Amino acid sequence: MKILVCISKTPDTTAKIAFKNNNTQFEETGVQWIINPYDEWYALVRAIELKEKDPSVTLHLVTVAGADADPIIRKALALGGDEAIRINTTSDDSFYIAAQIAEIAKTGSYDLILTGKETIDYNSSSVGGTIAGLLDIPFVSLAVKFELSGTTATITREIEGGEETAEVTLPVVVSCAKGVAEQRIPNMRGIMAARTKPLKVVEPAAVETLTHVVSYELPPAKAGVKLVAADNVAELVRLLHEEAKAI
Amino acid sequence: MVLIFIDHADGQIKKASYEALTYGADVAKQLGTTAEALLLGTVTANLTELGKYGVAKVNQVNNEAFNTVDALVYAKAIAEAVTTLGARVVILSHSQTGKAIAPMVSAKLKAGLVTGVVSLPATGSGFVVKKAVFSGKAFANVDIKSDIKIISINPNSYKIVAGEGAAKVVQLNITPGTSAIKVTGVDKVSGEVPLTEAEIVVSGGRGLKGPENWGMVEDLAHVLHAATACSRPVADSGWRPHHEHVGQTGVQIAPNLYIAIGISGAIQHLAGVNRSKHIVVINKDPEAPFFKAADYGIVGDAFDVVPKLTEEIKKLHGG
Ligand SMILES: Cc1cc2nc3c(=O)[nH]c(=O)nc-3n(C[C@H](O)[C@H](O)[C@H](O)COP(=O)(O)OP(=O)(O)OC[C@H]3O[C@@H](n4cnc5c(N)ncnc54)[C@H](O)[C@@H]3O)c2cc1C
Ligand SMILES: Nc1ncnc2c1ncn2[C@@H]1O[C@H](COP(=O)(O)O)[C@@H](O)[C@H]1O
């Protein structure tokens, strides 16, 4: 059994969001970088659990990023995994990123590919499904529960207004949301071990980018809160009805 | 031609698809072309009625095999329809179904995809769409360079407009591929408004002290026909189900009205709700950061204010 977990690097959840160069680039100064929470807490931890249950599992991590992502990928290796692959390029196009990972996946012939539900910077929810489409294998989105028995995965996923459970024969790509696993903290042994685990750097395949970010913008600032006295709730209802026309 | 993907469950077309239809018809108008709909599977609704939302033609693949969604099977069928019909722009909703299907269609057609789109494209030079990024804290304007363009629109970001018109319904002959996925159970939260589709959301935080106090939140939601939500610690403590957790690591929503009760307004919470059109905050602490992101606020005790609010809304609705 071979598992590939897709790891991306994102700004910390409290990072100040600002842009530079005429709003064409994210302002990285002062930003702390973390492993995208969905990739770390759910996809990676679930894969580690599967390996703990069955030590014959091979667990690889992959990221599409520049060398600045090495500390993040080492941190992921400190949680678990046998080796990491960094595809040495960056892009804001989901198709391009997915195509790079699909190339690695083809040569590695993985039985299971796990991604996070979405990155907290681009919020695309696209990379996992695109990898599956390129490999022509099933994709299960927004998994909240994942069990494996032999070559059959039993997966519960989010659907509108509820959940659906299904059995899927491997290979499959699964995007992981809350519920799939519980967050873990790396321990000293893991951190030491991660230092000597292989981190392979490979150059990207020739792939076209299909989309391109032209500029960023911040939402318009709020006009400021209108406070209503706690003993005058009727006034709030009037404002919501007449001014906001929201009720 | 602009092709709009229609999503359905239990024989009914989903609200988000009406939004996609209105949006797609407007995109077609802007590009000086026609809009058509694509529906895989069977529904009880009368499909000619979709003409009211601006599509001239509804393409249906009338095959019950499509009534459960296997993203791979769906994506192949959609890609085939796009090619046969010669669509240039494909529009879906950025709903749970859209998140499963759209990226696979992008792979099958080698077509650029932008998800979470919030407004009409700028088509002056190129095809530039605005999408929500950084969990609602910013927007990116993204140019799609491929010939075929795929976009999925954020729920509640476009107003549904129904006018006159009847669509022609045409059957497409597309054979579903074999599925490697066997659905064994569906668990729907019945009778409730789905969180991502709700116009109004009433949400509670740790300030409500415990699960036994959610009655007043539900009463308020009930009179407003609203969905209920909560902050992360509330879901983590098991006071409320996980699917109600909104924020950066939970569900991201953009209702017309968001009412936050006993929630401090941490940055990770705001990331999931700050695209709401109007925000009301009820908190006993005047320094709560949420007030900075709010449109209306009451500094007060939720246990006092919320029941009064429910009563006043009942009065407004005439009962
Ligand atoms: C990586 C990361 C991701 C996170 N993701 C999320 C997320 O997705 N969603 C999320 O919500 N949080 C998230 N958090 C947690 C977040 O930082 C806050 O801890 C959380 O939102 C606080 O929840 P709360 O507002 O319910 O509780 P508190 O911060 O404890 O606030 C309770 C509020 O209730 C008020 N209050 C108390 N009593 C009353 C009363 N009687 N009447 C009225 N008001 C009262 C208090 O004044 C206070 O403002 C995340 C944190 C991290 C680090
Ligand atoms: N640059 C990247 N390198 C590796 N994996 C990625 C990268 N970007 C996204 N992913 C994976 O794809 C998931 C969805 O990302 P997105 O489509 O950008 O929302 C993430 O949670 C990651 O698991």
Image (cartoon, rainbow, N blue to C red):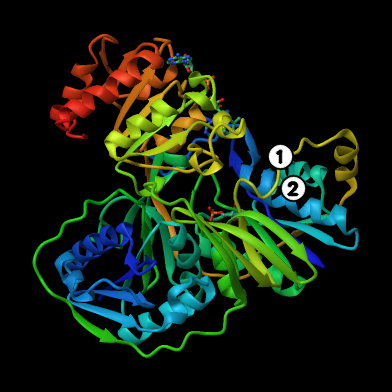
Query: Residues under labels 2 and 1: Cα distance?
Result: 7 Å
Q: Position of residue B112 (x, y in %)?
A: 43, 66
Q: Which residue is mark 2?
A: A45
Q: Chain of mark 2?
A: A
Residue in the foreground of this view, choosing between B191 and B27: B191
Q: Quadrant of the N terminus of chain B?
A: bottom left
**Which residue sits furthest left?**
B164
Check contact, mark 2 vs mark 1: CB within 8 A. yes
Please tell me which of labels 2 and 1 falls first in the chain: 2
Pointer 1 local density, CA inside 10 Å: few below 14, some 14–19, many at least 20? some
At x 71% / y 39%, what residue is drawn?
A: A183
Residue B102 on image: x %, y %: 45, 66
Disc 2 marks a residue whose amino acid type is: Val
Task: Pick the residue in front: B303 or A61.
Answer: B303
Name the residue tied to disc 1.
Answer: A183
| Tag 1 subunit | A
Q: Secondary structure at mark 1?
A: loop
Image x and y of residue B262, in percent: 44, 20
Q: Pick whichever, A168 or B42, lies toward us.
A: B42
Against B299, residue A186 (above or below) is below
Tell me if B268 is positioned left or right of A174 in this view.
Answer: left
SS category of the residue bearing label 2: helix
Q: Is residue A229 left or right of residue A194?
A: left
Q: Is residue B78 visible?
A: yes
Vertical comparison of B295 with A193: above or below:
above
Q: Is there one chain holding both mark 2 and mark 1?
A: yes
Residue at x 65% of width, y 54% of height: A145
